[in-house]
Image (cartoon, rainbow, N blue to C red):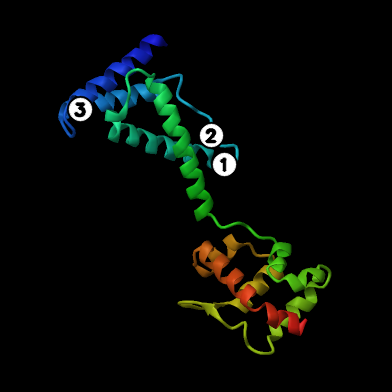
Amino acid sequence: MENHEETLKQLAIQAQQHPVQSTQRRLALNKLVSEIMRSPNLRRRAPASWPLHLYEDLYNQALNKTLLEICQKIDQYNPKHPVMAWVNELLGYRCLDVGREYNQNTPPTYSLDELKQELPDLKQLDDEDEMLAEFLKSDPENRLKIFIKGHPEATLQVLALAILEEGKTWKQLSIDFGIPMQTIVAFVKRNLQKLNDYFRNNL
């Protein structure tokens, strides 16, 4: 194991000694990356918050980002320290980055109860879903006819009823209408909040 770490260190030093973009530097970096991938000390754990079914994909994203960073910043490596300590430190940061990117790009899944929570005054309607459905259908002031830009069929009324009566998920709505899930979530939440008074005055 010590011999392997010494091999990594020599490859890192060798890469540092050659000019940027030179063939020799590229070859040394390619060998270094291959040895890092073989290292038994390579960090394999990732944040527990990652979904199990996406663990491998997210980890590979973080690892690829790390290896690219190693190649780009090889001159910052200090030979006084183990290569794998540096690699694992960077990998830890990239795991955090990938996790943040995943959370930012993945809209949360809302249940019917959570949808109602977007309208504080409807919290008491847990057992009166029919009343809410009738109001959505009648829309006395025609304020629920607003739709997602470029998709006149995807009105707030249609989307809300699909969630309430049909139990549709955001993902199902995305497939049905051919609209990104994040767009639908943002549209419904934003407009339900704007129409809070409309719901309160009619229910």
Secondary structure beneath disc 2? loop
Mark 2–mark 1 distance (CA, rounded to whole Å): 8 Å
In this rendered view, identify the residue nearer to me: 133 or 5.
5
Q: Is residue 28 left or right of residue 80?
A: left
In this rendered view, identify the residue nearer to me: 59 or 190.
190
Q: Measuring 71% from the left and 70% from the top, which residue is drawn there?
A: 164
Nearest to N terminus: mark 1 or mark 3:
3
According to the image, label 3 marks what residue?
Answer: 25
Q: Residue 2: percent from the left, percent from the top?
A: 40, 10
* Contact, mark 3 vs mark 2 (Cβ under 8 Å): no
Numbered tag placed on residue 46 in the rendering: 2
Q: Is residue 69 left or right of residue 105?
A: left
- State which quarter of the image contains the N terminus: top left
Q: Residue 81: percent from the left, percent from the top?
A: 38, 19
Q: Up-down: is 82 above or below 104?
A: above
Q: Up-down: is 32 above or below 195?
A: above
Q: Residue 39: percent from the left, percent from the top?
A: 41, 20
Q: Is residue 151 left or right of residue 193?
A: left
Residue type indicated by callout 3: Arg
Mark 1–mark 3 distance (CA, rounded to whole Å): 36 Å
Secondary structure beneath disc 3? helix
Whether residue 166 appears in this view of the structure is no
Numbered tag placed on residue 173 in the rendering: none
In this rendered view, identify the residue nearer to me: 74 or 47.
74
Q: Measuring 74% from the left and 84% from the top, which residue is drawn there?
A: 201
According to the image, label 1 marks what residue?
Answer: 50
